[in-house]
Each structure stands twice: as structure tokens, then as C-alpha cells.
Amino acid sequence: MKNRIFLEIFDRLYKFFGPQGWWPAETPFEVCVGAILTQNASWKNVERAIKNLKEINLLTPEALYNLSEKELSELIKPSGFYNLKAKRLKNFIHFLFENYGGSLEKMKEEEPETLRKKLLEIKGLGPETVDSILLYALDKPFFVVDAYTYRILSRHGLCPEETSYEELQSLFHENLDKDTDLFKEYHALLVACGKNFCKKREPLCKDCPLSYLR
Ligand code: SF4
């Protein structure tokens, strides 16, 4: 049986914050690039890196495939760890071309669990990045888990202190309908709650929409 509290959390956050409009991108490919660049970076800096690529029409799989890793790393400098991220982006682009001829549409046709396994084999792509790509770029129902998710759930006794990414993710998969729109909005709302109220050191429970959650 589903635990109703997972829907209640969503309802309360949605009522408080409203729709978050995630993922802020013009194309599914831009989502993929953003998901890789946002590792250890603020979204503002990711936006600057994406703008650099967009301004000279490089935000397509073909253009990035043909761009050297060195040129790419220069352009994405604002996102930090740019040499590493250029490598990761290149790894993803090569995977896309080797397996799906550079087409995200073709990649989308792959069986979801198989695709997830394959994406996780790309060097430098962890589960949060992979699930962000699957959910926000390809509309596959995989819940995206991050530090905010863990913090909020653990503070409400909904997950053990020691838990893995997969365990946290399966809590959402087991207790919610597998609805991509719901998953997209829910993750974004947890981030909003984490940033505004559920702070690492001093959570602002008094004013938080999740206070007195039972
Ligand atoms: S700030 Fe307090 S009430 Fe809000 S999610 Fe965190 S622990 Fe819960």
C-alpha cells in the first residue's frame, strides 16, 4: 500500500511554491548538457556556460561532436571544473553517436531500465545526472534524488540515516504513481524547500510548508 505522506508532501509544497517550471531549457539536448554541467556548480554559472555555447550555435549534438575537447572546455569555463566537465560532455556525446546516431529521439526509444544502465556506464555520469537526463530530457519516469531530498526525508523520519540513492529513489517509485509530470514538479519543489527552509545548519521549520507533517 502507498504511504499517503509522499503525496501530502507534494501537495503542501505545490500549494506553497506553485509550479517551478523545471527544467529551464529550450531543447531536450540543452537539458542533457545542463544536467552534466550542473554537477558541483550553481545554476547561474551553468547558464553562463550554456549561453556561451548557444551564442555561437554550438548547442547541438553534431556541433559538440565536432568541437575539440579543448575548445569545449574553454567555452564552459564558467561552470567550473571545466576540463573534467568537457570530458564528461564528450563521453556523453560519443555514447549518443555510437549507439543512436547522435539522435536523442532514437535514444528515447530504448527500453528505460536498459537505457538507465547504459547511461550509468558513461564515465563521470552518476545517478542524479542520469536520472535528470531520463526524466527532464526524455520523459522517463525516474525520480531524481539529491541532497535536499535526503535531508527533508530523513528529518521527517521517512528514510534511515544511512541510505543509498537507489533506496531513496525507490521510496518515491513505490509511493507515487509513475507520472513524469509529477516526478518533474516534485523534485523541483523539494529543491525549493531545501533552499528556502530546510537549510543544512538551521532549518527554518516554523515557516516551512512541511512543518507539523505527520
Ligand atoms: S525546514 Fe523543517 S519542516 Fe521544513 S522540511 Fe526541513 S525539517 Fe521539515
Image: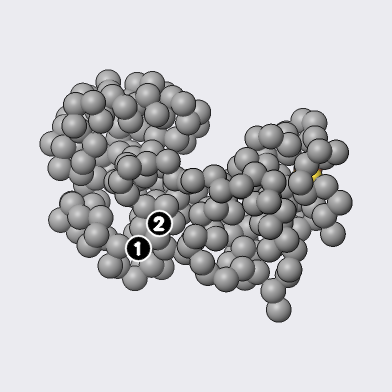
Q: Which mark is residue 115?
A: 1
Percent coordinates x, y for residue 135 in the rendering: 44, 56
C-beta proximity under 8 Å, tags 2 and 1: yes
Residue at (86% x, 51% y) in the render: 212
**Tag 1 secondary structure:** helix
Q: SS class of the residue under badge 2?
A: helix
Q: CA distance from mark 2 to mark 1?
A: 9 Å
Q: Position of residue 138 (x, y in %)?
A: 36, 58
What numbered label is drawn on residue 168? none
Q: Amino acid at mark 1?
A: Leu
Residue at x-position 85% and y-position 38%: 206
Going from N to C along the chain, the mark reached first, 2 or 1, is 1
Q: Is any atom of residue 96 visible in this view?
A: yes
Q: With respect to residue 36, does 181 lie above or below?
A: below
Q: Position of residue 122 (x, y in %)?
A: 34, 49
- The type of residue carrying mark 2 is Leu
Q: Quadrant of ligand 1?
A: top right
Q: Disc 2 designates what residue? A: 134
Left/right of residue 12 with respect to residue 133 in the rendered view: right
* In front of the other: 23 or 154: 23
Residue at x 83% of width, y 47% of height: 211
Residue 149 visible in the snapshot: no
